[in-house]
Image: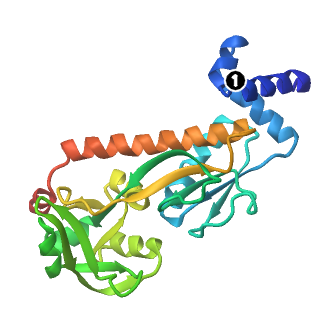
Amino acid sequence: MDLVGTLQVLVRVVETGSFSAVARERDLTQAAVARQIAQLEEHFGVRLCVAVPTTTSRFLVQRLPTLLAGHPGLKVELVISDRFGDMIQDRLDLALRVGEITDSSLIKRRSWTGERIAVVAPSYIERHGAPTVPADLEHHTCILHNVGSDSDVWTFVTPEGPKQVRVNGGFLANDFRAVRQAAEIGYGIALLPLLEVFDDLQSGQLFSLLNGFPAPGFPVSLVYPSRRHLAPRTRVVMEFVLAQMQEVRSSLEARTRHAAPASAVAND
């Protein structure tokens, strides 16, 4: 590695705030510029700390190898926690946060609405059929995410307004992953964050239900402590995460347009 030359590239990336601008200046591809920066960070042993909630950890863990393969030398430490701590004190460069951001010291790069969807395994549909409206859930076995006294009350948005349904089931857990696993083996219907089950929906291991009756969403934000001296490695990971979120959105929209109703699946 040309250390001096790569340091000059780093300086220009910081000054311009853009990989593409530096790539044009030096007649390089954007990937080549990013690779030089990654090599520099590897030379100095720099590591990026990223905090993610449990609801998105599975989704990102399965995609981070793609990012790392494209940026040799980049090191990412994933800190999985639902606790909102001090990012500077915790030495975090970037974080996905669920809920409203009230800390004025944090910069929001992007916010969007997280989604919960009802899901079920094909084997359950084969045995019991599928609900077509939220009220049908009262007659099905459901898997509860234990978050308190109202864990058995699920809310859906209908043309008439929010509709609450009290569901029943013999299995409940305080962890999304356990609820997902119980759904995958066909025990019952679960209401889970989209990112927790996105890959299962893509593979057909789980089906989405009640697509015309969404559950209320929740705010998700990508944040970092300060705009000053935003490291190139942070920009790389940030843009990667945003691209993955966009892929989910596009896939979900396509699925909504083309997927057959769950009742049709049950009758096949």
Q: Residue at x 27, y 79 (%)?
A: 153
Q: Which of the image's four quarters has the N terminus?
A: top right
- Using the image, determine if residue 234 lies above or below residue 213: above
Asked where in the image residue 67 lies, by quadrant, the reply is: top right
Decide if residue 68 is on the left or right side of residue 101: right
Residue 22 is situated, as x and y percent measured from the top left of the image, at 70, 19
Decide if residue 148 is on the left or right side of residue 72: left
Q: Residues within 10 Å of mark 1 (few under 14, many from 20)?
A: few
Q: Residue at x 35, y 51 (%)?
A: 202
Residue 170 is situated, as x and y percent measured from the top left of the image, at 30, 88
Q: Nearer the viewer, residue 54 or 64?
A: 54
- Using the image, determine if residue 98 lies above or below residue 11: below
Q: Which of the image's four quarters has the C terminus?
A: bottom left
Identify the residue at the far front of this view: 104
Coloration of the structure image = rainbow
Residue 9 is situated, as x and y percent measured from the top left of the image, at 79, 23
Decide if residue 206 is on the left or right side of residue 266: right
Q: Residue at x 26, y 59 (%)?
A: 208
Asked where in the image residue 189 lies, by quadrant, the reply is: bottom left
Q: Which residue is mark 1?
A: 16
Residue 126 is situated, as x and y percent measured from the top left of the image, at 17, 69
Asked where in the image residue 235 lies, by quadrant, the reply is: top right
Q: Secondary structure at mark 1?
A: helix
Under mark 1, the amino acid is Thr
Q: Nearer the viewer, residue 108 or 170?
A: 108
Q: Nearer the viewer, residue 229 or 199?
A: 229
